[in-house]
Amino acid sequence: MSKFILSAFSDEASMDLTTQLDVLQKHGIEYMEMRGVNDKNVADLTLEEAGEIKKELDKSGIKVSAIGSPIGKIGITDPFEPHLDKFKHVLELSKILDTKYIRMFSFFIPEGEDPDDYKDETIRRWKGFLEAAKDYDVILLHENEKDIYGDIPRRCYELVKALKCPQFKLIYDFANFVQCDVENYPDGFDLLKDEVIYFHIKDALYKNHKVVPAGYGDGQLEEILREAKEAGYEGFLSLEPHLGNFKGFAELENGQVNEELEDSGPVKFAVAVDALKELLKKL
C-alpha cells in the first residue's frame, strides 16, 4: 500500500512563518521542509528560536518533514571543521523541530575540474557527518544538486556504496538531474530507487534548464512516481517550486540566478501545488 505525503519548501511563498503556515493550510499540506523562516536560514536559528517556532507549528498543526539544511553546500576545498560544527548544531535543531530527516549535499567541485578526483575527500567528509549523527535518531538525506560531487546518478550511487550506512539515504530531485543533462527514467531512477526515500518535486526542461511546474518538463515525474506508487512507496513528496526569485535563492543556486526572474510568492506557490495535485490524479 503506497502513501504519498505532501510537504513543501514554504519559504518560497514567504519568509514569514505565519504566512507560510497560512499558505500550507490553505492548500491542505500538513508538512513543511524547513529551509528559510523569519528571514533566517534554518541552520542559523538558535535553539531558542527553534523552540519558539516549534510552538507556532504545534498550534497550526503543521509538522516538519525535513530540515532543508545547507550542509554540504560549501566548496570541497573549503575548511571542513567549521562546517561540521554547523552540522552538529543542525542535529540539535532536528530534535527541537521533531524531524528525523536532514537534507544535505556533497560539496561544490572547483569549476572545470573532474568531480571523480574528489571522491575520497567527499567520502571522508561524509563519514564525519555520519559519525557526528550516530547517536541521533536521524537520517541524512543526500540531494543530487548541480555542481556538487553527487550531481549525477552514478556518483550518488558511489556514495551509497562507499558509506554503507542506514543513516545515509537519497533524495531524488528530478529537475536537478535534468539540469545536469542526465536521464531520469529509466536509467537514473533504476540505479538509485532502492536508496531513495524522499522526493523533491521540481521539474525542468533540457533545452534551457528552466524550472517548470511538475509534469510540464522533461523530468519524467509521472513515470517515476507511478513506479514508486506501484512499488509501495510510503514517504514525502516535498514541493520545491523554484518558479520565481525568493530570499536565499542565489545562495541555493551557487550565485547563478537570473536577476530578471520575477519574485516568488503565494501565487506562484499555488501554481506549483496545483500542478502536482493534477499530476497525482493521473497515477
Image: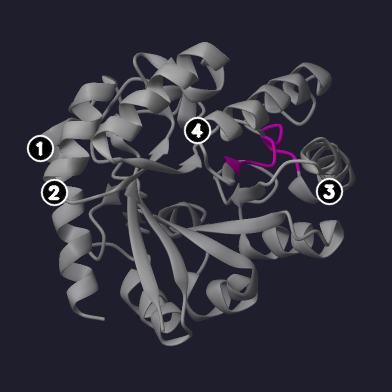
Residue at 21% x, 70% y is 279
**Front: mark 4 or 2:** 4
Residue nearest the observer in this picture, 178 or 69 = 69
Residue of label 1: 267
Residue of label 2: 271
Badge 2 amino acid: Val
Is any part of residue 48 visible from this angle?
yes
Looking at marks 4 and 2 on the same chain, the residue that comes earlier in the sequence is marked by 4
What is the magenta segment's predominant secondary structure? loop
Assess whether mark 2 and mark 1 are in contact (beta carbons under 8 angstroms): yes
Quarter where residue 226 is shown = bottom left
- Boundaries of the magenta span: 103-113
Question: In the rendered view, would you say 68 is above or below 50?
Answer: below
Quarter where residue 128 is shown = top right
Quarter where residue 102 is shown = top right
Residue of label 4: 97
The CA span between labels 3 and 4 is: 32 Å
Residue at 55% x, 46% y is 145
**Front: mark 3 or 1:** 1
- Looking at the rendered structure, the secondary structure element under dot 4 is loop
The CA span between labels 4 and 1 is: 27 Å
The CA span between labels 1 and 2 is: 7 Å
Question: In the rendered view, would you say 189 is above or below 74?
Answer: below
Question: In the rendered view, would you say 28 is above or below 9?
Answer: below
Position of residue 209 in the picture relative to residue 232 (left or right): left
Looking at marks 2 and 3 on the same chain, the residue that comes earlier in the sequence is marked by 3
- Looking at the rendered structure, the secondary structure element under dot 2 is helix
